[in-house]
Image: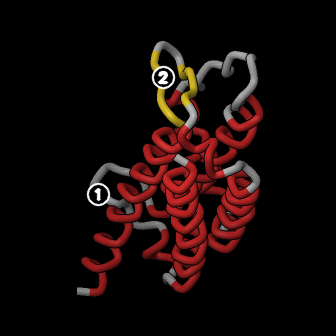
Amino acid sequence: MNGQGFSEKQQVIKHLEESIDWVQSLNQLPEESWRLPIEEGKWSIAEVIRHLVLWDDFIIHKRLPYLFTSQDFPGAPDVEVMNSKAAIQARDDSKEETVELFKQTRSKLLEQLTDIEGIRYGESLSLKSRKESLYDYLKGIMEHDEHHFKQIKQVINEKDA
């Protein structure tokens, strides 16, 4: 179990570190590309990155402090409201501000997850009516990131084609 937890933790840490580097590379995008929707009628790249910032902030403040305690997790936010808020903020912020905010928030998340012992990544958490390990919860977040990163890469590649 200890070895398993260690490798799970390393996988999460590596993903978070690489995500910071990748999002920082988006600073090189021209402003018009940064504001391009990922699909017709969908969010822009800016809005997607700001969406990730809000979810990282939610995890930092509404999930991590409750891990391995007897306290219940606070309820999840209204996803539509949270996503609308992210989109509005992204429209007001510059590309550099949004990328820097992503870096700061993701770095804080990375720091807090680094402080958790590897063995704890396999421990069961009670989320709503289901139980899953910390790693499984974080794996869902990594998959969410990858989903959005793939969309962004596709837009950038189409623009360059």
Q: Position of residue 54 (x, y in %)?
A: 63, 45
Say left or right for 41 vs 48: left
Quadrant in the picture for residue 58: top right
Residues marked 1 and 2 touching at CB (< 8 Å):
no
Whichever of callouts 1 and 2 sits on the residue coming sooner in the sequence is 1
Tag of residue 39: 1
The local crowd at label 1, few if under 14, some if 14 to 19, many if 20 or more residues have their Cα within 10 Å, is few
Q: Quadrant of the C terminus?
A: bottom left
Q: Position of residue 139 (x, y in %)?
A: 45, 48
**Mark 1 → mark 2, Cα distance in angstroms:** 35 Å
At 43% from the left and 43% from the top, the residue drawn is: 140
Tag of residue 131: 2
Q: Position of residue 141 (x, y in %)?
A: 48, 47
Tag of residue 70: none
Q: Is residue 24 above or below residue 56?
A: below
Q: Is residue 161 above or below residue 73?
A: below
Q: Is residue 117 above or below residue 22?
A: above
Question: Which amino acid type is marked by label 1?
Answer: Glu
Nearer the camera: disc 1 or disc 2: 2
At 75% from the left and 24% from the top, the residue drawn is: 69
**2 vs 109, nearest the viewer:** 2
At 71% from the left and 63% from the top, the residue drawn is: 107
Q: Looking at the image, how many numbered discs can be counted on the residues?
A: 2
SS type, badge 2: strand
The local crowd at label 2, few if under 14, some if 14 to 19, many if 20 or more residues have their Cα within 10 Å, is few
SS type, badge 1: loop
At 69% from the left and 32% from the top, the residue drawn is: 67
